[in-house]
Amino acid sequence: MCTTLAGQRRGRESTAEGGTGGPMVGARRQGQTWGVEHVDRAELAAFLRRWRARIQPADVGLPAGGRRRTPGLRRQEVAQLAGMSVEYYIRLEQGRGPRPSRQMIGAISRALRLSEDETAHLHHLVGEPPLPPSAMPRDVRPGILHLLDRLDDTPAMVCSAARDVLAWNAMAAALLGDFSALPPGERNLIWRFFTDPDARALHDPAGQADFARRAVADLRSAAARYPADSDLRRLVDRLLAGSAEFRDLWARQDVEVRRSTSKRIVHPVVGPLDLDCEALHDPHRDQWTIFYTAAPGTPSHSALRLLKVVGSQDLAVRD
């Protein structure tokens, strides 16, 4: 197998609702105003009622407790599971009451057995976007790995939001270099571009300037989405310390998320290739699968076919 893995209306509120052990309403931050318009109360009420009806007492370790007029849990049971007062929960289902805090959103989510996506939706309904994950996912879905292996004539790889190369096929290794020969901490397209002259030389002069600008802007966007990711912070610190060009581009504070593009790769064995780089996004993992293709009948298409042979003979450049 050629594929390889490396790897978010009221002023300050301090009154605790009975049974919660903490504030039910998030305090207003200095300089921030919260109004009724931030909470979609009708949609929140409908969402809570619907998902309460979905859960059976046995699902959460509660006795059925005799005949029930409606399916699912009773309101007092949800309140019990969430550690909040029944009166408060009833007000939420009636589209009334104060704005829930992050603490209580989490408690309700656990009580209703909400999925990650459902919990994020609940955060948005109360006008409190979910906190970003502490780190970027770096595991690649098995189906994507199988796809890479089947593409024996198309260079393809999977990158994280920070452009860590997480998986690749044999053609990607032949085109861009053997990532398995690099320590995991150096399997990053941006790091290699700014620190390895051979990797930089794969781009023509115009492509070098374009890649440098876009890559740094993309990395700044990722750093804002994952402020607690220690590996990403370490990557930025290393680049700031090791490359004056990176420091200059980082100081511009440009932000741009990766898009599909075209580029010229200057390969030392098969020569220049004009390639379309299709970048497909997996929003759940915030990962990109990148395919390098050439239009049929073009010299670049022929060069890719030659590269397949060169790669299989282990003559590919290793930078």
Image (spheres, grey):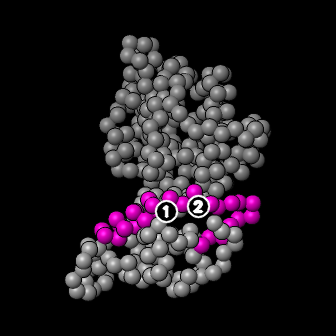
Name the disc covering residue 36, or none: 2
Q: Please name whichever residue, 17 or 186, is drawn nearer the observer in this view of the structure.
A: 17
**Left or right: 274 with respect to 81?**
right
**Image location of residue 95, percent across then percent down:** 47, 67
The secondary structure type at the circle numbered 1 is helix
Local packing at callout 1 (Cα closer than 10 Å; few below 14, some 14-19, many 20+) is many
Q: Please name whichever residue, 285 or 34, is drawn nearer the observer in this view of the structure.
A: 34
User: Does residue 84 show up?
Assistant: yes
**Image location of residue 138, percent across then percent down:** 49, 53
**Image location of residue 220, percent across then percent down:** 66, 45
Q: Quadrant of the N terminus?
A: top left
Q: Amino acid at mark 1?
A: Arg
Q: Amino acid at mark 2?
A: Val
The correct choice, above or below, for 124 with respect to 250 in the image is below
**Residue placed furthest toward the left:** 67
Is residue 192 magenta-colored?
Answer: no
**Image location of residue 179, percent across then percent down:** 51, 42
Cα distance between the residues tagged 1 and 2: 9 Å
Name the disc covering residue 107, or none: none
Q: Please name whichever residue, 62 or 175, is drawn nearer the observer in this view of the structure.
A: 62
Q: Earlier in the sequence, mark 1 or mark 2?
A: 2
Local packing at callout 2 (Cα closer than 10 Å; few below 14, some 14-19, many 20+) is few
The correct choice, above or below, for 139 with respect to 260 in the image is below
Residue occupying the point 47% across, 24% down:
276
Q: Quadrant of the C terminus?
A: top right
Residue occupying the point 46% across, 17% down:
300
Name the disc covering residue 41, or none: 1
Q: Are marks 1 and 2 in contact (CB under 8 Å)?
A: yes
| Figure label count | 2
Magenta span covers which residues? 25-54
Is residue 34 magenta-colored?
Answer: yes
